[in-house]
């Protein structure tokens, strides 16, 4: 069915304008197509002309013809009544002028869109793109193949009309960012991706840094048949670890780890620490696998040229390493954290920010070294790719550079693709994330963002999203997102699917908690039915975005 007719070229080289009646209700961001002749390379390598569907996205919609202003002057009388009295037809009175940006035709050889670099001629018929075409062309994921993440559907179509799948191999290797204001659904969306990555056709090796303890409900996957493969006995393992379970043996650190967790050591202090570290490793009387903080401090005193350097270094070592996180006897080996089909959630809600940053710094340096060693020498425990998801990513890769974890994360984001390490950054404050870190996340899921500074950060860090889509960010509602980057063939707005597991990142229901505490403090009993109603209401809130 023809939905519009091209009237003229647009203001930009890649734009055109078409006119459509109001009853088509084509929205901004919608996909359309027209048929055109393009030169395509055939199997023999020669160019030949072929008829192709050339796709475009609506970027602007404005009324071209409607009721005259005088028809609208009296709010008590409908425009239709005025027109009827004057004998003027009211059918088809509304026409709309829509501007569209050409995306191109789908090139099967490239698995991507190719722009023909020419807009359609006036009079060309325009049609709404079919659901099947969009499902096939918007991303490279094939829902019939392994490694496809069903994330939701196209926002401007009816729910379930155009399913969206993302290629896990792509965003797991080129990194991912999920950016949204508080309450817009970023943790919910991240959990949807985790659910997809732990399906039997992916069985990811995942590590989640969870500063607020929001991801524990992912354990429900272990009992959910949708995540199981009975023939192979596969069930995902979701391992929740609390701060008391998380320890790093000091001997597992190397000098770069030590330098990264110590506050701004001088060149002289670094030299003393290097000498002491090497001396301890070479000392046959010291079991270096269980080296202690006191042994390190004592050896620094022995090798230092003057007391002031040794004392200043000792103060820094105490500040960095004299904490429960570092233990000479206990440690958390990578083999305990990572393996295919296992998602480990480090719940750090009772750990200080500095300790969280230290943990991420040391842990991801260990992961990076292990993967580099395996890829180069074929040795080590991590003989499989790894994906790490960092909630509150601006804590660990801040724009001001004040975090020990920034360096290791920057290294992985720039080089990790070669060694099978993927990173996902989740944040409600993109303006507070290091620019290089944000730009290295090659797939972006951007939800509602209202802060102007954060909007500007997104514009700088996300290269291929047009102004028309970015302008929609403040108006998105929870669960709606713009998806862009390497995992899609063109940016588009999407509706995130419902989770299979329970959502536990809701705000605290203040009014319920106030009432409950007041009744408790005043020894007022509530009948069983009321209690049940309150519990049921709380469960309903937990299910909502």
Image (spheres, grey):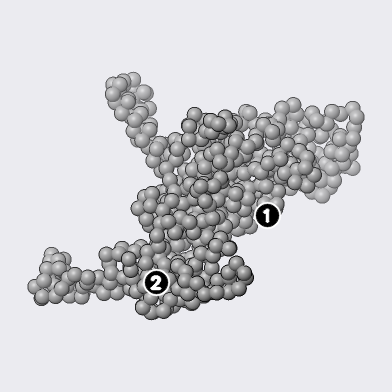
Which x, y percent locates residue 348? 58, 35
The image's mark for residue 159 is: none
Neighbor class of circle 2 (other Cα within 10 Å; few <14, some 14-19, many 20+) is many
- Counting the numbered discs, the total is 2
Q: Residue at x 44, y 59 (%)?
A: 133
The answer to whether residue 349 is left or right of residue 76 is right
The residue lying furthest to the front in this view is: 44
| Residues at circles 1 and 2 in contact by the CB criterion of under 8 Å | no
Q: Residue at x 29, y 26 (%)?
A: 530
Q: Residue furthest left?
A: 85
Quadrant (top left, top right, bottom left, bottom right) of the N terminus: bottom left
Residue 224: give x, y in percent of width and height. 48, 31
Classify 15 as above or below 344: below
Name the residue at 54% across, 55% down.
Answer: 140
Residue at 62 percent across and 56 percent down: it is 440
Label 2: which secondary element: strand
Residue 434: image location, x then y, percent: 61, 55
In the image, 153 versus 71, the foreground residue is: 153
Q: Which residue is mark 1?
A: 414
Q: Nearer the viewer, residue 321 or 61?
A: 61
In the foreground, 349 or 376 = 376
Vertical comparison of 439 with 369: above or below: below
The tag earlier along the polypeptide, 1 or 2, is 2
Residue 11 in picture, x, y percent from top left? 44, 77
Does any portion of residue 455 appear in the rendered image?
no
Specify the label residue 99 is tagged with: 2
Give the Cα distance between marks 1 and 2: 38 Å
Which image quarter holds the C terminus? top left
Q: Is residue 388 above or below residue 28?
A: above
């Amino acid at each position: 069915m023809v939905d519009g007719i091209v009237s003229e070229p647009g203001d930009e080289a890649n734009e055109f304008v078409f006119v459509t009646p109001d009853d088509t209700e084509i929205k901004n961001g919608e996909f359309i197509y027209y048929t055109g002749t393009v030169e395509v390379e055939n199997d023999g390598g020669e160019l030949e002309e072929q008829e192709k569907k050339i796709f475009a996205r609506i970027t602007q919609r404005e009324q071209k013809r409607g009721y005259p202003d005088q028809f609208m002057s009296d709010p008590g009388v409908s425009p239709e009544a005025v027109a009827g009295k004057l004998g003027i037809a009211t059918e088809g009175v509304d026409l709309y002028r829509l501007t569209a940006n050409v995306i191109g035709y789908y090139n099967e050889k490239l698995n991507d869109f190719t722009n023909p670099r020419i807009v359609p001629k006036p009079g060309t018929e325009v049609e709404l793109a079919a659901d099947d075409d969009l499902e096939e062309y918007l991303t490279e994921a094939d829902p019939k193949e392994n490694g496809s993440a069903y994330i939701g559907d196209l926002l401007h179509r009816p729910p379930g009309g155009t399913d969206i799948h993302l290629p896990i191999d792509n965003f797991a290797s080129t990194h991912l960012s999920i950016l949204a204001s508080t309450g817009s659904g970023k943790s919910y969306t991240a959990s949807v991706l985790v659910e997809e990555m732990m399906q039997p056709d992916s069985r990811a090796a995942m590590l989640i840094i969870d500063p607020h303890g929001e991801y524990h409900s992912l354990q429900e996957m272990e009992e959910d048949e949708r995540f199981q493969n009975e023939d192979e006995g596969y069930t995902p393992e979701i391992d929740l670890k609390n701060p008391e379970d998380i320890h790093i043996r000091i001997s597992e650190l190397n000098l770069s780890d030590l330098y990264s967790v110590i506050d701004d050591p001088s060149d002289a202090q670094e030299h003393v620490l290097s000498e002491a570290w090497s001396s301890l490793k070479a000392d046959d009387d010291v079991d270096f696998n269980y080296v202690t903080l006191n042994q390190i401090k004592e050896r620094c005193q022995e090798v230092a040229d003057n007391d002031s350097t040794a004392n200043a270094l000792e103060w820094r070592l105490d500040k960095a390493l004299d904490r429960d996180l570092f233990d000479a006897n206990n440690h958390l080996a990578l083999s305990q954290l990572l393996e295919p089909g296992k998602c480990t959630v480090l719940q750090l809600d009772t750990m200080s920010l500095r300790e969280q940053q230290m943990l991420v710094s040391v842990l991801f340096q260990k992961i990076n070294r292990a993967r580099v060693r395996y890829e180069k020498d074929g040795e080590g425990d991590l003989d499989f790719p790894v994906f790490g998801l960092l909630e509150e990513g601006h804590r660990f890769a801040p724009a001001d550079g004040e975090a020990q974890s920034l360096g290791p994360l920057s290294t992985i984001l720039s080089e990790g693709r070669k060694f099978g390490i993927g990173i996902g950054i989740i944040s409600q404050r993109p303006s507070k994330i290091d620019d290089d870190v944000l730009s290295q996340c090659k797939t972006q899921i951007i939800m509602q963002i209202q802060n102007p500074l954060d909007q500007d950060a997104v514009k700088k860090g996300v290269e291929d999203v047009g102004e028309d889509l970015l302008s929609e960010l403040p108006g998105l509602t929870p669960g709606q997102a713009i998806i862009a980057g390497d995992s899609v063939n063109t940016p588009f707005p999407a509706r995130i699917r419902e989770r299979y597991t329970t959502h536990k990142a809701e705000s605290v229901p203040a009014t319920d908690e106030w009432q409950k505490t007041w009744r408790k403090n005043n020894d007022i009993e509530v009948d069983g039915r009321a209690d049940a109603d309150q519990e049921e209401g709380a469960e309903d809130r937990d299910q909502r975005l």
